[in-house]
Image: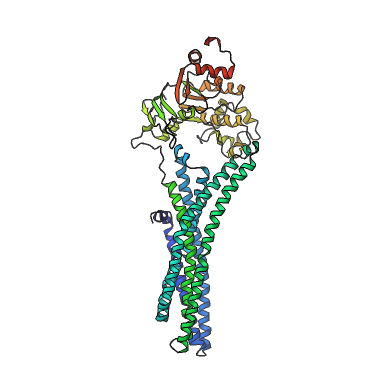
């Protein structure tokens, strides 16, 4: 009931249209209930009395009711579709906005495939609930109640005889409904798995091709597809037994009525018209019960999806602004201090990824972070913009704990070039000014020049207006990376984070980018995560990370003399002969 009430919140903005749809639906019920009485009148007052005018007039009334019912039914269907689609749209928007506010740790818990199912299949299930409820939700129960009343007014004895049959039919529907909801939930979980495999495979199609893993990926998809098919088949087979079972009860009820009612008609205690009307009302009572099976299926599916949607909407971002959070001033100097910082990913083992990090970055300094893969380099820089919060310790910017700053004001001062370059469908210009949509052409070109991207952009078919395909598939790795650097630089950040941002460019281009960055890094604090030692040689301070700890700290000249790890990295990349200063 809690989930139902929460789902009704999304119907509330459309309550006027929903009320109108229900009014139209209720009017259809009265018209449906009038038909058997009119049939009774045709038989008893027209045919039996040889009164042709009664037959004709009553038939015309029935025809008029049928035409009016058709018009009302179409209007009700249109309103139901409009409201259902609107609710689904609002739900998708709510889910999407919620995902945008997830912290990195929240996103770690949900695969892309799972989130896609919430936005598509689960939202569509709620749409079906709304539509089918507004089209049949009140019609079925009202038809049952109304038919029962009219059946009792026609023949109390026959009505009481049918009561056990109606109760048994209702019990079957309740039993099936309660068993369907958990089965739908299982089906949705298998759909999650299938979508995850599908999303990963499509995103990595080139990698699959390169490593000749099409057969392996085919087997993965086949397994997920087979599991979903098995569960879906099991559910459909279970559901398919309900309608035949109810049909048996309906036919049994008609046989009993014809037998008992026929005997009463023969003995004169019931007219033929009453018998036909009673039979019609019984069918009108039992048919909505069959109709309720469709509603039950939609509700079972919708409630399972509703739980999953609410799971997303109820997710609390693990990184939130403190109640007393303040903005980072525009005049920030960006002096960054790590005080005994340790960090562990949520759900990971007890081992910390970072342990006891103590580090000071003065305004305008370039801090290079070097270390083996998995040492914790990216984890360290991800703490600065609060993509994650430290497990312990503090990170201060100009003496202010970053947990006391609003996230928006913090991120407004941070420019990030991530390890994995992500571009969006749109023009080159739109990708560069993604974080600064109002940037002028001069600012866009200046950022592109600083990233050594201006020349290659001019050589593109339409220059800055060249369309970037999905994930930047029409650009090389180096070109994408330079656009990502330009995207960060155009924001004029006080803090610049380059997470292995020149790994996809050649040495010559890297040198050009480094020279350009040297001229713009003077007024900002820069963190450079690097695999190449050539990238860090001119840094003001080099941090060597080993197993989550700072193993060495200093300039290149200092470390080449004092740090064995740094000497090993230098020798492995630039040759076994150490420079003169190391001797």
Instruction: Choose between 97 and 380: the one closer to the eye.
Output: 380
Position of residue 320 measured from the top left corner of the image (x, y, whole percent): 39, 38
Which quadrant of the figure has residue 399? top left
Image vertical order of residue 486 relative to residue 158, above or below: above
Position of residue 332 measured from the top left corner of the image (x, y, whole percent): 40, 26
Image vertical order of residue 321 relative to residue 187, above or below: above
Instruction: Choose between 359 and 167: the one closer to the eye.
Output: 167
The residue drawn where x is 56% and y is 12% is 579
Instruction: Choose between 234 and 146: the one closer to the eye.
Output: 234
Applied colour scheme? rainbow
* Residue 126 seen: no
Image vertical order of residue 229 relative to residue 41, above or below: above
Image vertical order of residue 316 relative to residue 52, above or below: above
Q: Quadrant of the N terminus?
A: bottom left
* Residue 355 seen: yes
Q: How many marks?
A: 0
The residue drawn where x is 52% and y is 58% is 235
The residue drawn where x is 57% and y is 41% is 200
Position of residue 503 measured from the top left corner of the image (x, y, whole percent): 57, 27
Instruction: Choose between 501 and 452: the one closer to the eye.
Output: 501
Which quadrant of the figure has residue 353? top left
């Amino acid at each position: 009931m809690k989930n139902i009430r929460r789902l009704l919140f999304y119907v509330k903005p459309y309550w006027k249209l929903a009320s109108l749809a229900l009014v139209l639906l209720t009017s259809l019920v009265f018209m449906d209930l009038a038909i058997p009485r009119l049939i009774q009148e045709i038989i008893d007052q027209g045919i039996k009395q040889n009164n042709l005018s009664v037959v004709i007039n009553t038939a015309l009334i029935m025809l008029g009711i049928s035409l009016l019912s058709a018009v009302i039914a179409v209007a009700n269907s249109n309103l139901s579709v409009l409201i259902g689609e609107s609710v689904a749209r609002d739900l998708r928007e709510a889910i999407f906005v919620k995902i945008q506010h997830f912290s990195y740790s929240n996103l770690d818990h949900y695969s892309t495939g799972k989130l896609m199912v919430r936005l598509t299949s689960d939202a569509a299930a709620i749409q079906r609930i709304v539509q089918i409820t507004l089209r049949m939700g009140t019609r079925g129960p009202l038809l049952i109640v109304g038919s029962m009343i009219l059946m009792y007014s026609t023949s109390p004895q026959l009505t009481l005889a049918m009561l056990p049959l109606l109760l048994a039919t209702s019990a079957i529907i309740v039993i099936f409904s309660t068993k369907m909801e958990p089965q739908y939930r299982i089906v949705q979980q298998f759909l999650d798995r299938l979508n995850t495999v599908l999303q990963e495979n499509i995103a990595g199609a080139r990698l699959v091709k390169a490593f000749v893993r099409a057969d392996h990926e085919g087997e993965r998809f086949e397994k997920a597809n087979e599991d979903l098919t098995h569960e879906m088949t099991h559910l459909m087979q279970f559901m398919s037994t309900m309608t035949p079972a109810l049909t048996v009860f309906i036919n049994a009820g008609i046989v009993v009525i014809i037998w008992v009612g026929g005997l009463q008609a023969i003995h004169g205690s019931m007219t033929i018209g009453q018998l036909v009307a009673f039979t019609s009302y019984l069918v009108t009572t039992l048919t909505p019960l069959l109709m309720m099976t469709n509603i039950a299926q939609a509700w079972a599916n919708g409630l399972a999806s509703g739980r999953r949607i609410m799971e997303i909407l109820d997710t609390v971002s693990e990184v939130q602004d403190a109640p007393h959070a303040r903005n980072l001033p525009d005049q920030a100097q960006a002096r960054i201090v790590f005080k005994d910082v340790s960090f562990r990913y949520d759900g990971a083992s007890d081992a910390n990824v970072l342990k006891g990090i103590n580090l000071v970055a003065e305004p305008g300094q370039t801090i290079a972070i070097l270390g083996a893969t998995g040492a914790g380099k990216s984890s360290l820089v991800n703490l600065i913009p609060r993509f994650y919060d430290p497990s312990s310790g503090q990170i201060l910017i100009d003496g202010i704990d970053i947990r006391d700053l609003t996230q928006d004001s913090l991120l407004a001062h941070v420019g990030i070039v991530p390890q994995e370059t992500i571009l969006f469908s749109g023009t080159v210009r739109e990708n560069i000014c993604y974080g600064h949509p109002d940037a002028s052409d001069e600012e866009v070109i200046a950022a592109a020049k600083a990233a050594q991207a201006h020349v290659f952009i001019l050589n593109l078919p339409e220059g800055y207006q060249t369309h970037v395909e999905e994930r930047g598939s029409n650009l090389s790795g180096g070109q994408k990376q330079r656009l990502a650097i330009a995207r960060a630089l155009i924001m004029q950040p006080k803090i610049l984070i380059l997470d292995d941002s020149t790994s996809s460019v050649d040495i010559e281009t890297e040198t050009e980018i480094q020279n350009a960055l040297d001229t713009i890094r003077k007024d900002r604090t820069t963190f450079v995560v690097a695999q190449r030692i050539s990238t860090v040689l001119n840094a003001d301070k080099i941090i060597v990370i080993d197993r989550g700890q700072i193993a060495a700290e200093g300039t290149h000249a200092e470390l080449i003399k004092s740090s064995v790890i740094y000497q090993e990295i230098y020798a492995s990349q630039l040759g076994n002969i150490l420079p003169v200063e190391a001797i």
